Image (cartoon, rainbow, N blue to C red):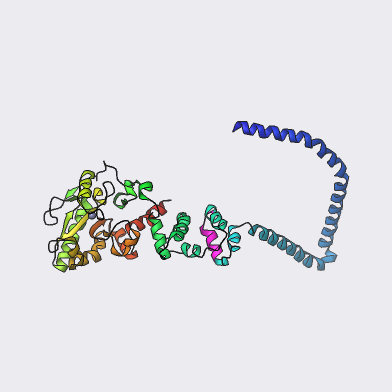
Protein backbone atom coordinates (compact mmCIF):
# COMPACT_ATOMS: atom_id res chain seq x y z
CA UNK A 1 0.00 0.00 0.00
CA UNK A 2 2.78 2.40 1.04
CA UNK A 3 4.69 1.56 -2.13
CA UNK A 4 1.67 2.41 -4.27
CA UNK A 5 1.28 5.76 -2.50
CA UNK A 6 4.98 6.53 -3.08
CA UNK A 7 4.66 5.73 -6.78
CA UNK A 8 1.61 8.01 -7.08
CA UNK A 9 3.43 10.79 -5.23
CA UNK A 10 6.47 10.52 -7.54
CA UNK A 11 4.21 10.58 -10.59
CA UNK A 12 2.43 13.71 -9.38
CA UNK A 13 5.80 15.39 -8.66
CA UNK A 14 7.00 14.57 -12.19
CA UNK A 15 3.82 15.91 -13.76
CA UNK A 16 4.10 19.06 -11.70
CA UNK A 17 7.66 19.81 -12.87
CA UNK A 18 6.43 19.52 -16.47
CA UNK A 19 3.27 21.55 -15.97
CA UNK A 20 4.64 24.32 -13.81
CA UNK A 21 6.54 26.31 -16.48
CA UNK A 22 3.63 25.97 -18.89
CA UNK A 23 1.16 27.22 -16.28
CA UNK A 24 3.44 30.13 -15.44
CA UNK A 25 3.62 31.08 -19.11
CA UNK A 26 -0.17 30.93 -19.44
CA UNK A 27 -0.63 32.99 -16.33
CA UNK A 28 1.67 35.71 -17.64
CA UNK A 29 -0.19 35.71 -20.95
CA UNK A 30 -3.71 35.92 -19.55
CA UNK A 31 -3.06 37.91 -16.41
CA UNK A 32 -3.75 41.36 -17.98
CA UNK A 33 -6.94 40.12 -19.59
CA UNK A 34 -8.20 38.54 -16.33
CA UNK A 35 -7.35 41.72 -14.46
CA UNK A 36 -9.25 43.81 -17.02
CA UNK A 37 -12.31 41.56 -16.77
CA UNK A 38 -12.22 41.67 -13.03
CA UNK A 39 -12.03 45.45 -12.99
CA UNK A 40 -14.97 45.71 -15.35
CA UNK A 41 -17.00 43.25 -13.31
CA UNK A 42 -16.27 45.20 -10.16
CA UNK A 43 -17.22 48.49 -11.83
CA UNK A 44 -20.48 46.99 -13.12
CA UNK A 45 -21.34 45.55 -9.76
CA UNK A 46 -20.70 48.87 -8.01
CA UNK A 47 -22.77 50.72 -10.58
CA UNK A 48 -25.58 48.24 -10.15
CA UNK A 49 -25.34 48.48 -6.41
CA UNK A 50 -25.59 52.25 -6.51
CA UNK A 51 -28.49 52.08 -8.87
CA UNK A 52 -30.23 49.67 -6.54
CA UNK A 53 -29.56 51.54 -3.32
CA UNK A 54 -29.91 55.10 -4.64
CA UNK A 55 -32.92 56.72 -2.90
CA UNK A 56 -33.79 58.43 -6.19
CA UNK A 57 -34.19 55.03 -7.80
CA UNK A 58 -36.40 53.45 -5.13
CA UNK A 59 -38.84 52.39 -7.82
CA UNK A 60 -36.11 50.16 -9.21
CA UNK A 61 -35.24 48.30 -6.00
CA UNK A 62 -38.36 46.09 -5.87
CA UNK A 63 -38.20 44.76 -9.44
CA UNK A 64 -34.42 44.40 -9.17
CA UNK A 65 -34.74 42.34 -5.98
CA UNK A 66 -37.47 40.24 -7.57
CA UNK A 67 -35.36 39.69 -10.66
CA UNK A 68 -32.33 38.70 -8.56
CA UNK A 69 -34.40 36.25 -6.54
CA UNK A 70 -35.90 34.83 -9.71
CA UNK A 71 -32.45 34.29 -11.20
CA UNK A 72 -31.34 32.62 -7.97
CA UNK A 73 -34.40 30.39 -7.96
CA UNK A 74 -33.86 29.37 -11.58
CA UNK A 75 -30.24 28.56 -10.80
CA UNK A 76 -31.19 26.45 -7.76
CA UNK A 77 -33.87 24.62 -9.77
CA UNK A 78 -31.42 23.94 -12.59
CA UNK A 79 -28.91 22.48 -10.12
CA UNK A 80 -31.63 20.38 -8.50
CA UNK A 81 -32.76 19.14 -11.93
CA UNK A 82 -29.24 18.12 -12.86
CA UNK A 83 -28.67 16.44 -9.47
CA UNK A 84 -32.02 14.60 -9.70
CA UNK A 85 -30.80 12.77 -12.80
CA UNK A 86 -28.20 11.05 -10.65
CA UNK A 87 -30.66 9.87 -7.96
CA UNK A 88 -31.91 6.29 -7.70
CA UNK A 89 -35.48 7.58 -7.89
CA UNK A 90 -34.87 9.11 -11.32
CA UNK A 91 -32.94 6.10 -12.62
CA UNK A 92 -35.74 3.73 -11.49
CA UNK A 93 -38.39 6.06 -12.91
CA UNK A 94 -36.64 6.02 -16.28
CA UNK A 95 -37.06 2.23 -16.41
CA UNK A 96 -40.83 2.75 -16.68
CA UNK A 97 -41.89 2.60 -13.03
CA UNK A 98 -44.68 5.06 -12.09
CA UNK A 99 -43.21 7.97 -10.15
CA UNK A 100 -44.78 7.01 -6.79
CA UNK A 101 -43.38 3.47 -7.13
CA UNK A 102 -39.94 4.79 -8.09
CA UNK A 103 -39.99 7.12 -5.10
CA UNK A 104 -41.01 4.37 -2.67
CA UNK A 105 -38.40 1.94 -4.04
CA UNK A 106 -35.66 4.57 -3.80
CA UNK A 107 -36.55 5.19 -0.15
CA UNK A 108 -36.66 1.52 0.86
CA UNK A 109 -33.72 0.06 -1.07
CA UNK A 110 -30.07 0.61 -0.26
CA UNK A 111 -27.70 1.72 -3.03
CA UNK A 112 -26.52 -1.78 -3.82
CA UNK A 113 -30.08 -3.13 -4.16
CA UNK A 114 -31.14 -0.12 -6.23
CA UNK A 115 -28.10 -0.61 -8.48
CA UNK A 116 -28.94 -4.25 -9.14
CA UNK A 117 -32.59 -3.34 -9.82
CA UNK A 118 -31.48 -0.62 -12.26
CA UNK A 119 -28.89 -2.91 -13.87
CA UNK A 120 -31.68 -5.29 -14.94
CA UNK A 121 -32.90 -2.46 -17.15
CA UNK A 122 -36.56 -3.53 -17.09
CA UNK A 123 -39.69 -2.50 -15.23
CA UNK A 124 -40.02 -5.41 -12.78
CA UNK A 125 -43.71 -5.31 -11.84
CA UNK A 126 -43.19 -7.39 -8.71
CA UNK A 127 -40.71 -4.98 -7.09
CA UNK A 128 -43.30 -2.52 -5.78
CA UNK A 129 -45.78 -5.14 -4.45
CA UNK A 130 -42.85 -6.76 -2.62
CA UNK A 131 -41.89 -3.66 -0.66
CA UNK A 132 -45.52 -3.14 0.35
CA UNK A 133 -45.90 -6.57 1.89
CA UNK A 134 -46.64 -6.73 5.62
CA UNK A 135 -43.53 -8.76 6.50
CA UNK A 136 -41.13 -7.21 3.99
CA UNK A 137 -37.52 -7.13 5.22
CA UNK A 138 -35.35 -4.74 3.21
CA UNK A 139 -32.21 -6.88 3.47
CA UNK A 140 -33.98 -9.74 1.68
CA UNK A 141 -35.09 -7.73 -1.37
CA UNK A 142 -32.76 -9.38 -3.89
CA UNK A 143 -33.71 -12.84 -2.63
CA UNK A 144 -37.45 -12.03 -2.95
CA UNK A 145 -36.89 -11.10 -6.59
CA UNK A 146 -34.80 -14.23 -7.22
CA UNK A 147 -37.43 -16.46 -5.56
CA UNK A 148 -40.19 -14.87 -7.55
CA UNK A 149 -38.28 -15.47 -10.78
CA UNK A 150 -37.59 -19.09 -9.82
CA UNK A 151 -41.21 -19.74 -8.80
CA UNK A 152 -43.21 -21.80 -11.27
CA UNK A 153 -46.34 -22.26 -9.15
CA UNK A 154 -47.66 -18.70 -9.26
CA UNK A 155 -47.24 -18.30 -5.49
CA UNK A 156 -48.69 -15.08 -4.04
CA UNK A 157 -46.21 -12.36 -3.08
CA UNK A 158 -46.97 -12.88 0.62
CA UNK A 159 -45.79 -16.51 0.33
CA UNK A 160 -42.61 -15.48 -1.50
CA UNK A 161 -41.89 -13.08 1.35
CA UNK A 162 -42.55 -15.76 3.99
CA UNK A 163 -40.46 -18.40 2.21
CA UNK A 164 -37.44 -16.10 1.94
CA UNK A 165 -37.80 -14.67 5.45
CA UNK A 166 -37.63 -18.14 6.97
CA UNK A 167 -34.78 -19.11 4.64
CA UNK A 168 -36.50 -21.83 2.60
CA UNK A 169 -34.84 -20.47 -0.54
CA UNK A 170 -31.53 -21.73 0.85
CA UNK A 171 -30.16 -25.23 1.20
CA UNK A 172 -30.24 -26.18 4.91
CA UNK A 173 -27.27 -28.49 4.48
CA UNK A 174 -25.17 -25.51 3.46
CA UNK A 175 -26.64 -22.61 5.41
CA UNK A 176 -27.53 -24.14 8.80
CA UNK A 177 -26.15 -22.10 11.70
CA UNK A 178 -25.91 -22.64 15.42
CA UNK A 179 -28.99 -21.54 17.39
CA UNK A 180 -28.72 -18.33 19.41
CA UNK A 181 -29.60 -19.72 22.83
CA UNK A 182 -29.31 -16.27 24.42
CA UNK A 183 -32.86 -15.67 23.15
CA UNK A 184 -34.09 -17.99 25.92
CA UNK A 185 -37.64 -19.15 25.39
CA UNK A 186 -37.63 -17.40 22.01
CA UNK A 187 -34.67 -19.37 20.64
CA UNK A 188 -35.26 -20.72 17.16
CA UNK A 189 -34.67 -24.35 16.26
CA UNK A 190 -35.47 -25.58 12.76
CA UNK A 191 -33.60 -27.14 9.85
CA UNK A 192 -31.47 -23.99 9.60
CA UNK A 193 -30.75 -23.49 13.32
CA UNK A 194 -29.35 -26.26 15.46
CA UNK A 195 -28.24 -26.92 19.02
CA UNK A 196 -24.93 -28.56 19.78
CA UNK A 197 -24.72 -31.94 21.39
CA UNK A 198 -23.97 -30.54 24.83
CA UNK A 199 -26.85 -28.08 25.08
CA UNK A 200 -29.08 -28.74 28.06
CA UNK A 201 -31.84 -26.57 29.58
CA UNK A 202 -30.84 -24.83 32.82
CA UNK A 203 -33.51 -26.45 34.99
CA UNK A 204 -35.89 -29.27 34.22
CA UNK A 205 -38.98 -30.10 36.25
CA UNK A 206 -40.91 -33.39 36.12
CA UNK A 207 -44.63 -33.42 35.23
CA UNK A 208 -46.89 -35.05 37.83
CA UNK A 209 -48.40 -38.33 36.70
CA UNK A 210 -51.84 -36.74 36.06
CA UNK A 211 -50.29 -34.71 33.27
CA UNK A 212 -48.11 -37.17 31.40
CA UNK A 213 -47.80 -40.80 30.39
CA UNK A 214 -44.33 -41.53 31.64
CA UNK A 215 -41.54 -39.65 33.29
CA UNK A 216 -41.66 -36.36 31.32
CA UNK A 217 -39.68 -33.20 32.05
CA UNK A 218 -39.67 -29.60 30.79
CA UNK A 219 -38.66 -26.09 31.89
CA UNK A 220 -40.59 -24.92 34.99
CA UNK A 221 -42.64 -22.24 33.12
CA UNK A 222 -43.65 -24.83 30.56
CA UNK A 223 -44.83 -27.29 33.19
CA UNK A 224 -46.87 -24.58 35.00
CA UNK A 225 -48.45 -23.33 31.77
CA UNK A 226 -49.37 -26.86 30.69
CA UNK A 227 -50.96 -27.66 34.06
CA UNK A 228 -53.14 -24.52 33.86
CA UNK A 229 -54.13 -25.34 30.28
CA UNK A 230 -54.90 -28.96 31.06
CA UNK A 231 -57.18 -28.01 33.97
CA UNK A 232 -59.13 -25.46 31.90
CA UNK A 233 -59.43 -27.89 29.01
CA UNK A 234 -60.80 -30.56 31.35
CA UNK A 235 -63.33 -28.13 32.77
CA UNK A 236 -64.53 -27.09 29.32
CA UNK A 237 -64.34 -30.30 27.29
CA UNK A 238 -64.28 -33.04 29.92
CA UNK A 239 -61.15 -34.54 28.32
CA UNK A 240 -57.70 -34.80 29.88
CA UNK A 241 -54.71 -33.53 27.90
CA UNK A 242 -51.55 -35.58 28.43
CA UNK A 243 -47.90 -35.00 27.58
CA UNK A 244 -46.47 -38.00 25.80
CA UNK A 245 -43.11 -36.55 24.94
CA UNK A 246 -41.23 -33.48 26.19
CA UNK A 247 -37.54 -32.90 26.85
CA UNK A 248 -35.26 -35.19 24.87
CA UNK A 249 -31.50 -34.88 25.00
CA UNK A 250 -29.29 -35.20 21.92
CA UNK A 251 -28.78 -38.92 22.39
CA UNK A 252 -32.48 -39.65 22.88
CA UNK A 253 -33.30 -37.56 19.81
CA UNK A 254 -30.85 -39.60 17.75
CA UNK A 255 -32.66 -42.78 18.82
CA UNK A 256 -36.12 -41.23 18.21
CA UNK A 257 -35.03 -40.12 14.73
CA UNK A 258 -33.85 -43.60 13.83
CA UNK A 259 -37.06 -45.23 15.12
CA UNK A 260 -39.69 -42.94 13.56
CA UNK A 261 -41.15 -41.50 10.39
CA UNK A 262 -38.55 -38.94 9.23
CA UNK A 263 -41.34 -36.54 8.19
CA UNK A 264 -42.33 -35.99 11.81
CA UNK A 265 -39.03 -36.29 13.65
CA UNK A 266 -36.09 -33.93 13.43
CA UNK A 267 -32.45 -34.97 13.34
CA UNK A 268 -30.59 -34.68 16.64
CA UNK A 269 -29.60 -31.06 17.24
CA UNK A 270 -32.44 -29.82 15.03
CA UNK A 271 -35.25 -30.73 17.44
CA UNK A 272 -37.06 -28.29 19.72
CA UNK A 273 -37.42 -31.10 22.23
CA UNK A 274 -33.80 -30.54 23.24
CA UNK A 275 -34.73 -27.06 24.56
CA UNK A 276 -37.23 -28.22 27.20
CA UNK A 277 -39.74 -25.83 25.59
CA UNK A 278 -41.58 -28.32 23.37
CA UNK A 279 -44.32 -30.80 24.24
CA UNK A 280 -46.06 -33.51 22.27
CA UNK A 281 -49.62 -33.62 23.55
CA UNK A 282 -52.60 -35.92 23.08
CA UNK A 283 -55.35 -36.88 25.57
CA UNK A 284 -56.39 -39.78 27.73
CA UNK A 285 -59.51 -40.07 25.59
CA UNK A 286 -57.54 -39.88 22.29
CA UNK A 287 -54.00 -41.09 22.91
CA UNK A 288 -53.28 -41.55 19.20
CA UNK A 289 -52.07 -38.44 17.42
CA UNK A 290 -54.39 -38.29 14.43
CA UNK A 291 -57.78 -38.92 16.07
CA UNK A 292 -56.62 -36.35 18.66
CA UNK A 293 -56.42 -33.80 15.85
CA UNK A 294 -60.20 -34.12 15.23
CA UNK A 295 -61.23 -34.54 18.89
CA UNK A 296 -62.95 -31.72 20.77
CA UNK A 297 -59.98 -31.39 23.16
CA UNK A 298 -57.56 -31.32 20.20
CA UNK A 299 -59.58 -28.53 18.61
CA UNK A 300 -59.88 -26.75 21.99
CA UNK A 301 -56.09 -26.93 22.48
CA UNK A 302 -55.47 -25.52 19.01
CA UNK A 303 -57.82 -22.60 19.66
CA UNK A 304 -56.77 -21.80 23.23
CA UNK A 305 -53.13 -22.81 23.72
CA UNK A 306 -51.88 -19.26 23.01
CA UNK A 307 -53.73 -18.05 26.12
CA UNK A 308 -51.24 -20.11 28.13
CA UNK A 309 -48.11 -19.17 26.17
CA UNK A 310 -48.06 -22.11 23.73
CA UNK A 311 -48.21 -22.14 19.96
CA UNK A 312 -48.96 -24.97 17.60
CA UNK A 313 -45.50 -24.99 16.11
CA UNK A 314 -46.35 -26.65 12.79
CA UNK A 315 -49.84 -25.46 11.77
CA UNK A 316 -51.72 -27.00 8.86
CA UNK A 317 -52.34 -23.68 7.10
CA UNK A 318 -48.62 -22.79 6.87
CA UNK A 319 -47.20 -26.15 5.78
CA UNK A 320 -46.12 -24.73 2.43
CA UNK A 321 -43.77 -22.26 4.07
CA UNK A 322 -42.28 -24.68 6.60
CA UNK A 323 -39.76 -27.42 6.35
CA UNK A 324 -42.04 -29.53 8.50
CA UNK A 325 -45.29 -31.38 8.04
CA UNK A 326 -48.39 -30.47 10.02
CA UNK A 327 -48.14 -31.72 13.63
CA UNK A 328 -51.34 -31.14 15.62
CA UNK A 329 -49.71 -32.50 18.78
CA UNK A 330 -46.48 -30.48 18.91
CA UNK A 331 -46.66 -27.42 21.16
CA UNK A 332 -43.90 -24.93 21.70
CA UNK A 333 -43.77 -22.59 24.69
CA UNK A 334 -42.92 -18.96 23.84
CA UNK A 335 -44.73 -17.04 26.61
CA UNK A 336 -48.23 -15.53 26.50
CA UNK A 337 -47.39 -12.22 24.80
CA UNK A 338 -45.54 -13.82 21.88
CA UNK A 339 -48.01 -16.70 21.57
CA UNK A 340 -50.91 -14.23 21.28
CA UNK A 341 -49.15 -12.22 18.64
CA UNK A 342 -48.30 -15.31 16.58
CA UNK A 343 -51.89 -16.55 16.92
CA UNK A 344 -53.45 -13.17 16.04
CA UNK A 345 -51.22 -12.63 13.01
CA UNK A 346 -51.57 -16.20 11.76
CA UNK A 347 -47.85 -16.72 11.22
CA UNK A 348 -45.39 -19.42 12.26
CA UNK A 349 -42.70 -19.00 14.87
CA UNK A 350 -40.05 -19.02 12.11
CA UNK A 351 -41.76 -16.02 10.47
CA UNK A 352 -42.14 -14.30 13.83
CA UNK A 353 -38.47 -14.82 14.60
CA UNK A 354 -37.28 -13.49 11.24
CA UNK A 355 -39.44 -10.37 11.38
CA UNK A 356 -39.71 -9.43 15.02
CA UNK A 357 -36.47 -10.73 16.49
CA UNK A 358 -33.78 -10.90 13.80
CA UNK A 359 -34.86 -7.84 11.81
CA UNK A 360 -35.37 -5.69 14.88
CA UNK A 361 -31.99 -6.73 16.27
CA UNK A 362 -30.22 -5.30 13.20
ZN1 LIG B 1 -42.68 -32.84 18.93
Bounds of the magenta segment: 101-110
Residue 345 position in % (x across, y down): 34, 64
Q: Residue furthest front?
A: 152
Q: Nearer the viewer, residue 170 or 297?
A: 170
Residue drawn at the location 66% of the way across and 32% of the way down: 7
Query: Image check: 36 left or right of 180?
Result: right
Residue 137 picture location, percent across and down: 44, 57
Please identify the dominant SS of the magenta region: helix
Q: Is residue 106 magenta?
A: yes
Q: Quadrant of ligand 1?
A: bottom left
Count every numbered label the image shows and give the total: 0
- Report whether residue 117 is seen: yes
304 on left or right of 170:
left
Say which of 208 and 62 sits in front.
Answer: 208
Query: Depth check: 7 or 241 in front?
Result: 7
Q: Is residue 32 above or below residue 82?
A: above
Taking 352 as reference, is 276 left or right? left
Q: Which x, y percent locates residue 302? A: 24, 64
Left or right: where 249 falls relative to 80: left
**Looking at the rendering, which quadrant does residue 304 occupy?**
bottom left
Query: What residue do we see at 55% from left, 57% from top?
Result: 120
- Which corner quadrant holds the N terminus? top right
In the depicted structure, whether residue 129 falls above or below residue 258: below
Residue at 78 percent of width and 67 percent of height: 63
Could one spot residue 203 in this view of the protein?
no
Residue 208 placed where, x, y %? 13, 53
Q: Quadrant of residue 353?
A: bottom left
Q: Residue furthest left?
A: 209
Tell me, yes or no, whether the highlighted magenta stretch contains residue 301. Answer: no
Give the quadrant of residue 152.
Answer: bottom left
Amino acid sequence: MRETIDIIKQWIARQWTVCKPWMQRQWKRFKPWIQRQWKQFKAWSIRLWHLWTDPDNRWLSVPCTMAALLVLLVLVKCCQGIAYNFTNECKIYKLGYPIDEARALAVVLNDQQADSLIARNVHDTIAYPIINERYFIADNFDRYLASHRADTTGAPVSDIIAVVNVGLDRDPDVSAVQCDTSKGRLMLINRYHYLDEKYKPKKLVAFKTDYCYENQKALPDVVDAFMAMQQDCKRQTGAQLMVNSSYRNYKQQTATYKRNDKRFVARAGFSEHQTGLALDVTSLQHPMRWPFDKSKEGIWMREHCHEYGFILRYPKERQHIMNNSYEPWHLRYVGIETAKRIHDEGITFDEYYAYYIEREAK
